[in-house]
Structure formats: C-alpha cells, structure tokens
Image (cartoon, rainbow, N blue to C red):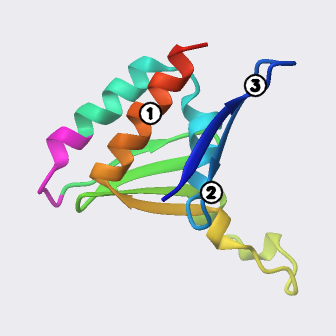
Amino acid sequence: MDYEFKKNTLDGSYHAVFSMGHEALGRWLIEEIGKDFAKMDSILAQIGALKNSTQEWRLIGDELTLSLQDNEALIQANFLFSEDDDEYEEDLHLYDEESMSLCGFEDFTLVLDAWRAFVTRF
C-alpha cells in the first residue's frame, strides 16, 4: 500500500492520497480522525487488545466506519450498511473500491503512526 500525506498551505487542509484499493483509508484519516490524538490512541489500544482474537470492535463515524477483527482493519462507507437500495437508481452502480479499504493490523498501525507524525508537524 502506497500513500502520501500533504498539507495545503493556502487553507491548512490535510490530504491523504492512497494507492488504488485503499482510497477509503485516506478519506477516513481526513474526515474521521484528523488531529484527534485521543481517538488514535484508543484505536491503537483496541488493536493491541484484539491481536490474535476473533472479537470485533467498531468505530462508527459520520461517513465511514472502522471495523477491527481477525487481525484486519476494514474501513467502509456508512452507506454500504444501508439496506434501502431503492434510494439508488437501477442503472447507478456504486464504485465500492473507493468506499472500502482492508489491511492488516501491522500496516494499519504503521499508517496511523505516520499520520500522527504528519499532523503533529503542523
């Protein structure tokens, strides 16, 4: 998984650009985590508690949800949990690849640590 973090010098906004298949992880960092160090600490603690466990832990955000289970982190857009498919036109196909990301705990922890280091600098 390749990624790059950037900060817009004009408006101070953050950007997280991830390789194909992991775009949702970048969105999640920007929209749901930002500079919330307490949330990052909580997630890292949950990862430590869940290693080699079959239990699941979820963090439901405004747009995206993090699920930790089976040594994997799954980010999914909340609309994917909706059972109301009538809301979308028949011919409209959602591009799920940009709406979910999956990676192992090790890679996910590295990303969270890198994000923390990045946002701490600014």
Image coordinates for residue 77, horizontal then vertical, percent = 61, 56
Where residue 102 sits, quadrant-wise, is: bottom left
Instruction: Between residue 62 and residue 17, name the one nearer to us.
Output: 17
Q: Earlier in the sequence, mark 2 or mark 3?
A: 3
- Mark 1, residues whose alpha carbon is within 10 Å: few (<14), some, or many (≥20)? some
Query: Residue under circle 1?
Result: 114
Q: Mark 1 falls on what kind of element?
A: helix
Amino acid type of the residue tagged 1 in the rendering: Ala
Left or right: residue 88 versus residue 110 is right
Where residue 14 sits, quadrant-wise, is: top right
**Residue at 19% across, 55% down:** 55
**Residue at 29% across, 52% down:** 105
Q: Earlier in the sequence, mark 1 or mark 3?
A: 3
- Mark 3, residues whose alpha carbon is within 10 Å: few (<14), some, or many (≥20)? few
Q: Are marks 2 and 3 in contact (CB under 8 Å)?
A: no
Q: Earlier in the sequence, mark 1 or mark 2?
A: 2
Left or right: residue 76 versus residue 69 is right
Q: Which residues are magenta?
A: 47-54
**Residue at 56% across, 38% down:** 29
Query: Residue under circle 3?
Result: 13
